[in-house]
Amino acid sequence: MDKQAISKIIYNHIFTNKQSLKEQFSKSEKAIGYFFLDTVLPEALALECAKVFPNPEEMKMLKSIKEYKYVSAQMDKHHELLEAVIYAFQNKKIVELIGEICNISSLYPDDSLYAGGLSLMAKDNFLNPHLDNSHDAERERWRVLNLLYYVTPHWQKENGGHLELWPNGPKKESVIIESKFNRLIVMATHSKSWHSVNKVTIEGSRCCISNYYFSDNALRETDKFHVTKFRGRPNQTFTNLLLDCDASLRMLVRKLFKKGVRKNPHVYKKTNN
């Protein structure tokens, strides 16, 4: 099935549920706006995505006190179905429809997959509470929405690897949104949208296809440029101190060098055929 056919399926399913999704997002918007939608693709197609998803050895491992996971944005190294699905979510009609649901008039997909693409979390993998980088690679547009589509069948709550939102900050209680098979989660990214992924507890892989949408305007008037900022969990005092220092140093670098001292390597480097 090609990208256009997949886009049509996704669009129709989101459109059918448009009102309930608007209500979900509106209800949560004052803290961290989000909505989720299940059975996004036909089950057979979603199962095929899981079947052809790359193994950890075929991806880049990120391991530090901030995170432990596997990622890839170089889609031509992987099965063509995965590239078709990820770019299906960038279809103009889908972007506009999600913009209507989230009440965002200026919204753009990201062809370069800057910080997007594929992610895999295996046993003991985690992602600490953090704020996403506020802008795109060129600091021209604001990062405003994170789209996460999960494709691991039979993934249970006790497995871990689920999205956590921290609507009152990372020192308070989190809200867990399960990374269920064939589920799409769309969440707002702004200066208060702390989120994380809890530790995977089983021998298995939680697989995700992700996109970011960008805008000419920030979601909140108080938003300012910031680098990706990590924190520890509520009981990780020492980790908090280290990560606060890390974020402060990286912000200082970005004040001196607007686009950083090196380009983020996590983009899709396309070859011209």
Image (cartoon, rainbow, N blue to C red):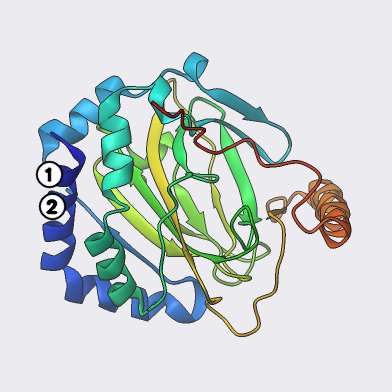
Q: Secondary structure at mark 1?
A: helix
The location of residue 36, given as percent across then percent down, is 30, 59
Looking at the rendering, which quadrant does residue 101 occupy? bottom left
Say which amino acid is labelled 2. Answer: Lys
User: Does the CB distance between marks 1 and 2 fall below 8 Å?
Assistant: yes
Give the image location of residue 173, x and y in percent: 57, 64
- Residue for point 16% across, 45% down: 4
Q: Residue furthest top?
A: 57
Q: Which residue is mark 1?
A: 5
Question: Which of these two is toward me, 88 or 53?
Answer: 88
Residue drawn where x is 27% and y is 78% of the image = 23
Q: Which residue is mark 2?
A: 8
Q: Quadrant of the C terminus?
A: top left
Q: Is residue 135 above or below residue 2?
A: below
The amino acid type of the residue labelled 1 equals Ala
Does 99 sit left or right of 220 as displayed? left
Q: Is residue 152 visible?
A: no
How far apart in space, not on screen, are marks 1 and 2 (Cα)?
A: 5 Å
